[in-house]
Image (cartoon, rainbow, N blue to C red):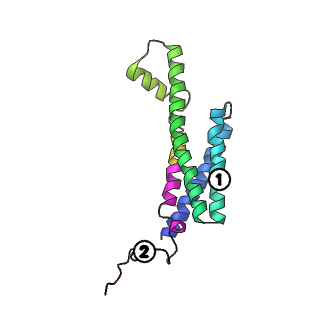
């Protein structure tokens, strides 16, 4: 059951990474270095997932986990950048706008302010995939007694 769920999670990460990549390419999201960041990161997601599928080792899981953490961070940075850009645009249009009115216009602005959260969501999904991954468990000869969840008998 856990293995099937793990495969589904990885398939969702791959599907999401492919979809986000296509979306960003169609939007021509490569005008600046900041805009290239999610594209490069998504290529890293696809590469790390391919390595993981081919060689499900502890090293591959850790690499995948690191890329997923970068996705979460990049999504948060993207939220900030999109929102900040929208605030600047709104202040150019109406310099006296402040408070909730400015927030509301910026969050609904020309640049989709919440779109980068999808990269963070993808990262969280990938981190869920790595949770208690079997490749991260030490070999049975190294595990302390009872580490597998089964109580040991005492004499």
Span highlighted in magenta in the image = 122-137
Q: Is residue 139 above or below residue 114?
A: below
Answer with left or right where residue 125 lies relative to residue 24.
left
**Magenta stretch encompasses residue 128:** yes
Picture coordinates of residue 123, whole percent (x, y): 53, 49
Residue at the (66%, 65%) spot, across then down: 54
Residues packed near mark 1 inside 10 Å, few (<14), some (14 to 19) or many (20 plus) = many
The residue that label 2 is drawn on is: 144
Q: Secondary structure at mark 1?
A: helix
Residues packed near mark 2 inside 10 Å, few (<14), some (14 to 19) or many (20 plus) = few
Residue 104 showing in the rendered view: yes
Residue located farthest toward the left when viewing the structure as drawn? 155
**Magenta stretch encompasses residue 16:** no
For this rendering, which residue is in front, 133 or 147? 147
Tally the marks. Answer: 2
Q: Secondary structure at mark 2?
A: loop
The residue that label 1 is drawn on is: 46
């Amino acid at each position: 059951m856990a293995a099937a769920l793990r495969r589904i999670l990885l398939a969702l990460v791959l599907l999401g990474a492919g979809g986000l990549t296509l979306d960003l390419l169609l939007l021509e999201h490569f005008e600046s270095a900041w805009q290239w960041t999610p594209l490069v990161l998504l290529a890293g997601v696809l590469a790390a997932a391919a390595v993981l599928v081919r060689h499900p080792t502890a090293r591959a899981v850790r690499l995948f986990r690191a890329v997923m953490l970068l996705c979460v961070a990049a999504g948060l940075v993207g939220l900030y950048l999109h929102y900040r850009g929208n605030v600047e645009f709104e202040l150019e249009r109406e310099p006296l706008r402040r408070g909730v009115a400015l927030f509301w216009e910026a969050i609904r602005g020309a640049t989709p302010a919440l779109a980068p959260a999808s990269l963070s969501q993808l990262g969280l999904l990938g981190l869920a995939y790595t949770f208690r991954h079997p490749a991260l468990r030490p070999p049975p000869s190294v595990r302390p007694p009872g580490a597998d969840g089964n109580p040991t008998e005492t004499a």
